[in-house]
Structure formats: structure tokens, C-alpha cells
Amino acid sequence: CFHNSYNLGDEHDYIQSNYSSWEELKKGIESKEEVLAIKPLYLYDHSGITISTSPFQCRWDSGQVGWIYITKGTVKITGMPIDKDLDKSIDLELSTYDQEIQGEVFGFSCYKDGECIDSCGGFYGRDIRKNGMFDHIPEEFEILLKEVVELEIG
């Protein structure tokens, strides 16, 4: 990923000025890496950032910033089956990373008499029922949580 204001993605040795276009960079990546799947990476920057493998509608605040890809080495390390839909895997991985950079990863701490009695983090997405947080809250705090959720929703 190449951006003047943000340091995103994995570290790499590619230098943007060595390539005259995104397609030339793609060919460079494919010649150096054992690429199994590759997709363009776009960034939208307006009161926060978000990333996608599809271009955004706003040309002023968005554009391509690189490529996202899966290599044979990644498949070997992760144990991902090669016959898996790798394009879908890229989209799922990017969706998770996008939630991280948008600040949509949550956790909780439960206190009783000033002492932390339970805490847990790593819940992706704002919906506490879908992200699993609600299922991890101790029973004695569920009523409080339901009141807070109703206030936010209602």
C-alpha cells in the first residue's frame, strides 16, 4: 500500500516511483512473488478512512493505493486450501482490516465495587449481538447492557 499520510498493510520492499502505473506494479509483484490471487486496493479518505477492493464513487477523496494479494507462502503458513475461493478470502481479510482501521473493534470491562471482575476484547463490528460481545458479558451485567443498547437503538 502506498499513501503519503498512512502506513497501511504489510511491510514490503516495493518503491512506488520505480513503477509507471498500477499495472506495472502488479506485474512486478507477480514476477517476484508466487501470487495465487491479486486484487486492486482502494482507499477513501474523508473524516476517517476506509479501504476496499472496489473503487469508491468520490474521485476527489479516493483512489487506488496498491494491491492486495495471496501468495503460495501465505497459503502454506495459514493452512488455507488452495482450492478455496481466494478472491473471497481477500475480501474477507480486507473487511476485517477495514473494521480495524475504522475503529470498529470493541471490548468491555465489567467492574464491581471498583474492581475489574471480567474483560474481553477483539469484537469486530458495531452490532454486539452479531459480533459475539453480548454472549460474553457476565449475566449480572446483561440487564445494564440491554438498557444501554435500547437507549442507543431506540
Image: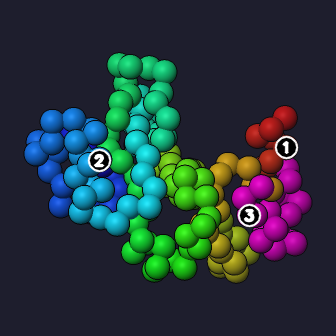
**Could you tell me the amino acid type at mark 2?**
Lys
Q: Residues within 10 Å of mark 2 (few under 14, many from 20)?
A: some
Residue 145 lies in the magenta stretch: yes
Q: Residues within 10 Å of mark 3 (few under 14, many from 20)?
A: many
Residue 13 visible somewhere in the drawing: yes
Labels 2 and 1 touching (C-beta < 8 A): no
Q: Secondary structure at mark 2?
A: helix
Q: Position of residue 153 (x, y in %)?
A: 80, 38
Span colored in magenta: 130-147
Q: Residues within 10 Å of mark 1 (few under 14, many from 20)?
A: few
Residue where numbered disc 1 is placed: 150
106 lies left or right of 31? right
Q: How is the image coloured?
A: rainbow
> Where is 65 relative to 141, above or below?
above
Residue where numbered disc 2 is placed: 26
Q: Image point 40% across, 66% down: which residue?
A: 71
N-term-proximal mark, 2 vs 3: 2
Residue where numbered disc 3 is placed: 133
Spatial CA distance of label 2 from label 1 is 48 Å
Residue 92 visible somewhere in the drawing: no
Spatial CA distance of label 2 from label 3 is 39 Å
**Could you tell me the amino acid type at mark 1?**
Glu
Labels 2 and 3 touching (C-beta < 8 A): no
Please name whichever residue, 80 or 108, is drawn nearer the observer in this view of the structure: 80
Q: Quadrant of residue 113?
A: bottom right
N-term-proximal mark, 1 vs 3: 3
Spatial CA distance of label 1 from label 3 is 16 Å
